[in-house]
Image (spheres, helix red, strand yellow):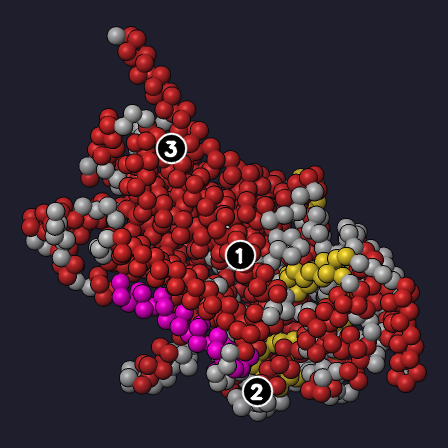
Amino acid sequence: MNWKTTAPAIGLALLASTGLARAEGELNIYNWGNYTSPDVIKKFEEKYKVKVTITDYDSNDTALAKVRQGGTGFDIAIPSQTYVPIWIEEGLVQETDPSTMENFKNVAPEWANPEFDPGRKFTVPWAWGTIGVVVNTDAYKGPADSWSIIFNTPDELKGKVNVVPEMGDVMFAAIMYLGGEQCTDDKALLKKVRDMLVAAKPNWVAMEYNTIERMGAGDFKATSDWNGSALRQRLAHPEIHFNYPKEGFGMWSDNVVVLKEAKNVENAKLFQNFIMDPENAAGLSAFHRYANAISGSEKYMPDDMKDAPEVVIPADAKPHGELQKMCSPETQALYTKIWTELQK
Amino acid sequence: MAKRRFDLKALPGFTTIAVICFVALYLPIIILVAYAFNAATSTSEWGGFSLKWFASAWNNDQVIDATIRSFQIAVLAATFATIAATMAALATTRTKAYRGLTFKYAFINQPLMVPEIVTAVALLIFFSRIKVWTGYAGLGYLIGAHTAFCIPFAYLPIRARLESMDLTLERAAADLYATPFKAFRRVTLPLLWPGILAGFMLAFVISLDDVVITNFVKLGGQDTLPTYMLGQIRRGITPEINAISTAFLLLSILIVTLFFFASRKRD
Amino acid sequence: MASAQETALSAERQDIRNRWLLSAPALIIILLAAIGPLFIVLIYSFLAAGPYGDVEWKFSTDGWISVFLQRDIFDDTLSFADAHLAIFWRSVKLSIGTTLLTIVFGFPTAYFIATRPERTREMWLFLITIPFWTNLLIRTFAILQIIRNEGIINTLLIKAGFINQPIQILFTDTAIMIGMVYVYLPLMVLPLYASMEKLDFRLVEAGYDLYASRFAVLRRIIFPLVKPGVIAGSILVFIPSLGAYVTPSLLGGGKNMMLGNLIELQFGQGRNWPLGSAISITLMAIVMIALLAYVRNAGSSEVRHG
């Protein structure tokens, strides 16, 4: 998309929107912890004279469970793509039709009509990323663009590998490594998956989330991880590198929805539109360190993110990426059993 | 009367273990405080001295609000829990078995027996109905939930104290003072005080540390410090929290020192 | 005569009524915010799992069956759910270890505090609890700093020449125990102190003259007197450590589940709320029975001691 032509249009649109919308009052955001840029929020507050309150959640399941019970007082939540269909199906979100919003034209074409929300009737992209393998090259110099680091750990890394304990992500990676399709319920393959996981586990030192600190301190020498987390690790320690597994790596995206029970619907819609503005989207990225699916935001991105290999997927790795889907409840139940057996 | 204390040295190793315990309790705290002054964005890698995290914490409204809210809930919940637990302890000790006594005991200790996540989910379902009926969306839910799970923590030390208390003094007091209330206030309560204080302190600490139940019960804008931190684990924790903890530590040590000197003057 | 008996009886009835009144606030709060909601969990354990978490309002015993039995996902045979048993057993082992260690460290500490001059005792109590006024997660990370491979313990041991290679403590069961003992120590010390504080040290002195052996004094005089404190402390440490979840996952590395994690999995990513509910109720029943047996037993032995 050509910036020179869109910039004035966006400028005009922004002007127009300030003129038209005079929403005053509050906005209650329910988001992942440490994920919301205070600067962008301040800008939104000043622009629309709205008081924004942010409350944190720690997992998609907590957020879903709470919102499903109702009475939470939140206007906006930011679930991941695997959960968005559930939120829509269960009638927890409002159809705000972001595709008709002022700033929707900025949404990158590959994110404009995603499978989890066809036609973007409910959601606005917040961030997207990948899940790959992070390796400290001081400890291991061999090729690392493979899930074998995790599932068939090379000797140098034995007892120094961490696995981020997201059941869906680990199952996805294991299935990819064995050449299956995501969400497969092929029992023969799943049996291999289980045996492989059980055999690989003794080589892992831990299964936990706190990778930035532990990789930095050297307690882990390799880990499965999200790309934005890997970026932070490399900026502090240049020897730490993110790798895109050639067997196939998962992609995810978090999306802004307006809850059905929202009290400040107009402000919530303004917010959805607001973050599709390239400059604001870049502001969000600068804080949460992930890509944002808004074309034209590249210009405003911090320098250390513009060409970061963690954020901009290299051309040769791109074909291996696949957006993770929501698996059927039956498949999910199978995976839970394998997971329980792995951690017993 | 100058009562000679049983010589401590008669139990060799006790003082040593106690000293080891105090050192072990404070060693992590010293590290925690040290990293509050870290110039790097890490709670485990030292990057030079800096005061920036104090400034950053001070300017972070979310963190300040969460800290104040944590203390607010802990003080209220611990107070309510201690009062209820003291009454319950008086009602369930020093009596011959009566019908319902065992039941009461099990009932009061019940919040201990269920993993937090279960109470959390149950309360989430239960409170959301109340919310829909009444429309009330204040801190009451959190305070109520905290009070409930703090009660056994306050109850058990108070009960232990009561059980090992001497009855003779109270009997004498009952004969002396006209009303049972006076006897209670003048004799039982002072005797019971160490138990009550221990119970209150436990309840306070337990409330202050709670993550799981709070995470499920909290409403919009009701983050406490632990739930705020929980959300941060995946994204890396900054020494901001160390700075906040350090500030509150200094404050509490100051208060304790003042108490100490005040009580010394009284002597 | 009959009337005297009647008055005694009515006084007793009055006393019991007062006792119910006194305990009412605690009972009501717990009923409203802990036990009442648990009935929801009980009901949920008999419902079918919803496709994406939560439940479907259909009667089902699947949740209860899968607590004990599992259908093998590959050959469909029904067998005992040994994964659940393994997790349960690990939790019990670690909890017992934690309880014993808190007694070993907590008893002398409480004794130390109880033997300080009266006016400084409260200060010592505060000193025990102040570390816990800081945030749990930050504190756990600080413990992690100490036991890491490059941490204080390993560095000291290497410098002193005891070991050449750092010992891997972090992310092991030992680390979980260290963390849990740290977290639960005040839960043992405070009840112990509460029952010890009134200990008549003249008795101890007399006993010392009588038995001469320090150990005998400890065992015959001090320990029976502070038994209620030991019981209270053990309950407060043992039961919460069964369901512990933050410390095991941060210090233990989360590779092996504890009961708390297993239940959390069912309410979270596993999306099997009825199973989660059924496991919790099973756990609660076991703990409740054990507790009542323990208290009854401890109580009767106390009577024997006089």
Give the amino acid type for the residue marked by disc 2 in the picture: His
On the rendered structure, is B206 left or right of A7?
left
Q: Residues within 10 Å of mark 1 (few under 14, many from 20)?
A: many
Q: Which residues are magenta?
A: B18-46
Which image quadrant for residue A291? bottom right
Closer-to-camera residue (A97/A327): A97
The subunit letter for the residue under badge 1 reads B
Report whether residue B24 is seen: yes
Where is residue B130 drawn, in percent x and y?
66, 40
Q: Is residue B149 magenta?
A: no
Extreme front residue here?
Answer: B265
Residue topped by disc 3 = B91
Give the amino acid type for the residue marked by disc 3 in the picture: Ala
Where is residue A39 drawn, in percent x and y?
70, 73
Which of label 2 and label 3 is nearer to you?
3
Whether discs 3 and 1 lie on one chain: the answer is yes
Extreme top residue here?
Answer: C2
Residue topped by disc 2 = A237
Residue topped by disc 1 = B70
Where is residue C289 drawn, in percent x and y?
41, 41
Which image quadrant for residue B64? bottom right
3D distance between C-alphas at marks 2 and 3: 62 Å
Q: Is residue B36 magenta?
A: yes
